[in-house]
Structures are given as C-alpha cells and as structure tokens.
Amino acid sequence: MAAFFKNNTIYFMSQTIAFVGVGRMGANMARRLKDCGYTISAVCDAHRPSATSLAEELGCAAPETLAEVTASAGVIFTVVTNDASMRGIFLGAGDSLLKGAQGKIFINCATLSPGIHREVHAAAEAAGAHCLEAAMASSISHAREGKLYLMLAGDEAVYQSVLPMIEQMSVNRRFIGGPGRAAEVKALVNMVMNINTAGLAEGLGLAAALGHDLDMIREIFSQTGANSRVLETDGGDMVAREHDCWFSAEHAAKDSGIAQGIARETGLSLPLNDATKAQYDKMVTLGLGGLDKSGIAELTFKGRHA
C-alpha cells in the first residue's frame, strides 16, 4: 500500500494494476510490470479477444465493463487509439472508468490531443480520482524491456507516488508540468520525427532516380548534416521496401494532425508539417496506412506507388 499527500489530504493507494488498451504497446507494458512483481488484476480492450488472450497469459481477469476494471485496481493504465476512444472510456454516459473511481490513479499513455487530456483530468478530479499523462517515445520492444522514454504531466504528487512503478517501465523520463503539457511535447516529438521521415524518403528517392548507390548515399548522409535518428532506424527499410509495422503510417497521419491542430489554435503556420500530414494521409487513402511510417518512401521512389 502506497500513499501520497495532496491538497492537505493523504491518499492511500493499492498498487494493483489494470490496463485498458492492450495492443502491442499496452500488452508489453503489462507483461513488463508483471515480471517486476506487480499484480495485474485486469485487462480490457475494445477487441475482446486481445484482452481474453492476454488475461489468460497473465493470470488475471478480462472484465466486460470499464467500471469493473476500475474496481479491480488502484492504478489503471490506458493506451487507446485516439481522442474519441479516450472520451469513450472516461466520459461515456453509461459505463465508464470514472464509475466508483474515487482515490484511483489513471496513467494515460496514448498520443492524444492536449485538450482531451485536460478534459479527462478535470473529470477525474471531479470524481475524486487522479490522472497522469505518460506519453511514450519508444518502440514495442522498449515497452517489453522496461526501456521506454516517458514524458509525464499532471499533478507532481501523483507522479511521485507512482515513480517506482514508472522507473520499472522506463530507461529515462521527464516530468514536464500540468495537464496537457506532456501531450504538447509528444506532439512536437512526433511532428519532427514525421517530417524527418518524409524528408529522408524524398532524399533517397531522388538519389535512386539519379542512379546513385543508396548504401553510399546513406553512409554519406550519416557523416553530414543529413544525418538523423530516422536515417538509422528507417533508411535501410526504405531502400529494401521492408515496412513491417513498428509505428504505422496511419498513426503518423493522426499525430501530425494533432500538431496541425495545436498550431492552428496558436495561430502558427507549419507548412512542412502540413505537407508531411498530406503524404501520410495519402498513404491511408491508398490503403497503405498499416505499413510502418518508413513506407512513406513508397510515395517518393520511381516505379512504386504514384
């Protein structure tokens, strides 16, 4: 039993854990915490077979209602697809994670708009519960190995209360500020990553059209101002057309759209982000949204998709 102090009140908290959203990231986070000795009480997913299969593996429940998930644990992680899904699990008129949620802690890990994080935070506070953003900037294997990089926001007292658990999941982390602030920074991270990916695809596509050896081009890029983390992670896949999905083009389109929305709210023009989002939107339209984001090269190399 852990405790934390907030607003002149001591909150006692069970560190039994549940998960809502057990796709590849959520499932591997649950496996990691189970390996670290935490009790996983329940898992839940809109795709019920995913939940029942993981529940059998972890030896936990797979409740059919969100309220049952909340009742089962002191800390509930959510890893959902988009703002609409987040609104559905927390703010639905019927079944909701906030039913009977007093004293519970929700750690929300999906890449969503800052606005929905703030909306959920306010609703949780009204229900006597607590929210923490834990935006992830890592891959599926990092989730399984406890090597995530996490950007966190919300109430710092809540963050400190779950820090030992967070440390088991992450190789590094940064607490950023109040509600929505981690979501803002995550939008910036993915915006720049997506722009870099699109730029690399165009550079390699043009090099290929000119007849250059692409291994040579990638080596030269790595030694010059064209170098980037994306060159390391995606360059070879772009050349080999190996686009097994680690971070999908569909998610890239969504995340570039989050940055686009934030920019419009602040009155900024971000033409590079707009162009990048248009490319990822085109992939989705062409039925390529399930490819890894490296698949954007399919739009730039001659003889591939137009």
Image (cartoon, rainbow, N blue to C red):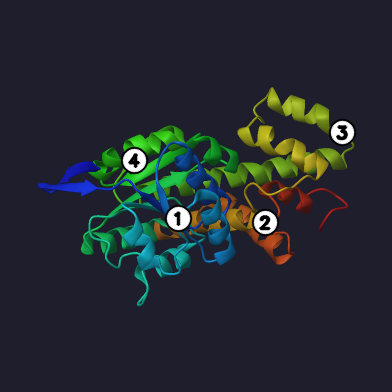
* Residue situated furthest bottom in the rendering: 93
> Mark 4 touching mark 2, by CB under 8 A?
no
CA gap between label 1 and label 3 equals: 38 Å
Q: How many other residues sit within 10 Å of disc 2, few (<14), some (14-19) or many (≥20)?
A: some
Q: CA distance from mark 2 to mark 1?
A: 18 Å
Q: Is residue 290 left or right of residue 154?
A: right
Disc 4 or 2, which lies upstream in sequence? 4
Looking at the image, which residue is at 35% across and 77% down? 93
**Distance between the Cα atoms at labels 4 and 2?**
31 Å
In the image, 128 versus 16, the foreground residue is 16
Q: Is residue 166 visible?
A: yes
Q: Name the quadrant containing residue 214.
A: top right
Regarding residue 47, the answer to whether it shows in the image is no
The residue identified by callout 4 is: 176
Residue 304 screen position, x and y as percent: 84, 53
- Badge 4 marks a residue whose secondary structure is strand
